Amino acid sequence: MTLRIEITRPDDWHLHLRDGDELKSVLPHSARQFARAIIMPNLKPPVTDTETALTYRERILTAIPPGIVFDPLMTLYLTDRTTPDEIRRAAESGFIKAVKLYPAGATTHSDSGVTNLDRCDAALSEMEKQEMPLLVHGEVADPSIDIFDRERIFIESVLQPMLARYPGMRIIFEHITTKDAVDFVVSASDNLAATITAHHLLYNRNVVFSGGLRPHHYCLPVLKRETHRRALLEAASSGDPKFMLGTDSAPHTRHSKESACACAGCYTAHAALELYAEAFESVNALDRLESFASFNGPDFYRLPRNASKITLEKQDWTVPPSFSYGKNDSLIPLRAGELLHWKMI
Ligand code: DOR
Ligand code: ZN
């Protein structure tokens, strides 16, 4: 008999959709599986105000395939110049659900990010007042710090002081990659939660170097060693409501990945739920997938859980070798040309 599991329709609490023709190429993959997604604001130029977020949201709504219901939950990109007034406007808009902190220089399109958190004090205080969650890319950007230590050092030098200074603010530590982050989230107040990607649950850093340099497995924060992957898997499948699904699916053109200076980002939206199912099955925790994928996110964001259901079936299928992307480029998905063992039907 075919094995099937039915769960409440999930949401993706961290997604890069890009814009224009690229947006049209990738959006159907996410909308097939997820009812809602938190849309990252790191466009070029970034989404730093409510008006820009509104027009971006309209372009996303226009790109949704007919007959599919998908609600893009918008975010603002925090800069040194974000004003408390802008935070108020965002909160009053109703469609902006969070503000994203990129330390300047930490990752793709983060050059307009925050150079010094003291400069954001007024904006962050207003966020605390407006009950607007803060999403953090949790890595220090200092190039002199070893890339594998940047998340751990961010915790002690930025996150811990931030939680103390704004005790009423809900913070989501995005795409955590280390046991240090897991332990910190578990021990911190209920105002701190974390997203975990499918690729950080399935791979350790060896995959980036297996038989040659593999740019399609290069993302930020970079994959870490096996002990960290194990800790992430244990956290995601523990039932702890502080951990939620966030793919960080980040499309880049094939030529910008297969380059002397490859862009950071793994594309997982084409099979996100199937990849998470594989990770959960590996630790016999499929019964915990629903809380991680469908309950913990809306509960933390104080949004209703979805009412509809989706079904995953144990079935082998082969991921296409590439997808068309934008006007005339292509995109290499995670597991391109390889087998997956779960399929959403
Ligand atoms: O790997 C990543 N890609 N990490 C990020 O933080 C940004 C993202 C992107 O936008 O490409
Ligand atoms: Zn991201």
Image (spheres, helix red, strand yellow):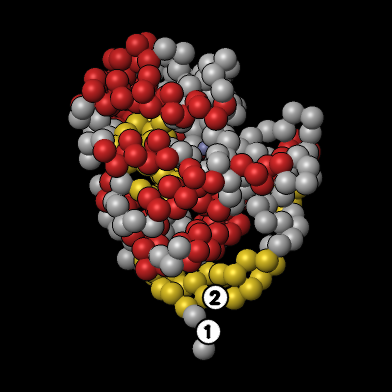
How many residues crowd mark 2 within 10 Å: few (<14), some (14–19), many (20+)?
Answer: some
Q: Is residue 87 above or below residue 6?
A: above
How many residues crowd mark 1 within 10 Å: few (<14), some (14–19), many (20+)?
Answer: few
Cβ–Cβ under 8 Å for marks 2 and 1: yes
Mark 2 is on which residue type? Lys
- The disc, 2 or 1, on the residue closer to the chain's N-terminal end is 1
Can you name the residue that lies furthest to the bottom here?
Answer: 1
Can you name the residue that lies furthest to the front here?
Answer: 227
Q: Position of residue 218 (x, y in %)?
A: 65, 39
Query: Toward which corner of the image does residue 86 lie, by quadrant?
Result: top left
| Residue found at x 55% / y 53% | 202
Where does label 2 land, which residue?
314
Residue 205 seen anywhere in this rendered image of the structure = yes
Q: Is residue 342 left or right of residue 305?
A: right
Q: Is residue 152 above or below residue 203?
A: above
Q: Is residue 203 left or right of residue 307?
A: right
Q: Secondary structure at mark 1?
A: loop
Q: Secondary structure at mark 2?
A: strand
Where does label 1 land, which residue?
2
Q: Is residue 60 above or below residue 159?
A: below
Whether label 1 lies within 8 Å of ligand 2 gets the answer no
